[in-house]
Amino acid sequence: MQSKIWVIGDSHTRAFSFNDNFIPFYIGGGKQRCFLSDQRLSDLISKVLHIVKEVAAQDSIILFLGEPDTRFNLGIGWKPWKRYYRKIFL
């Protein structure tokens, strides 16, 4: 059996949906999975550990998290398509 790469995370995991080497596992939107409180972090850890129990020994895991946290901490909020986002990154 060929080993797989499990991609566990927010909506960005969908980018791996059409490649047979990956198993994308969506655990909720970035806003709900961000690290803004100890409770959210605890919930995230519980969800990830529940999934990890199912991963075969020969498989690998990528946690795909944190992009909303990065935008929030940069002060650009949750809407990167807004004009102020372009001023910072373009």
Image (tube, rainbow, N blue to C red):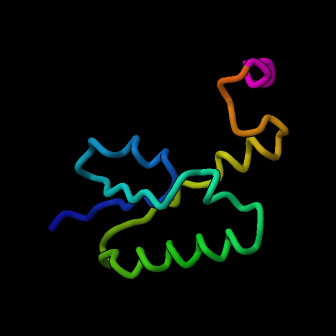
User: Horizontal and vertical percent for residue 7?
Assistant: 42, 57
Instruction: Please tell me which residue is depicted at 43% across the width and 65% down the height of the picture.
Output: 61
Quarter of the view holding residue 8: bottom left
User: Horizontal and vertical percent for residue 22?
Assistant: 31, 54
Query: Where is 22 relative to 38, above or below?
Result: above
User: Horizontal and vertical percent for residue 23?
Assistant: 31, 57
Of residues 13 and 36, the one drawn nearer to the viewer in this rendering:
36
Relative placement, left or right, of 80 versus 21 is: right
**Quadrant including the N terminus:** bottom left
Instruction: Please tell me which residue is depicted at 25% across the width and 65% down the height of the picture.
Output: 3
Magenta stretch, overall SS:
helix
Instruction: Please tell me which residue is depicted at 30% across the width and 76% down the height of the picture.
Output: 56
Instruction: Please tell me which residue is depicted at 49% across the width and 45% down the height of the picture.
Output: 12
Whether 87 is among the magenta residues is: yes
Query: Magenta span covers which residues?
Result: 83-90
Relative placement, left or right, of 11 versus 2 is: right
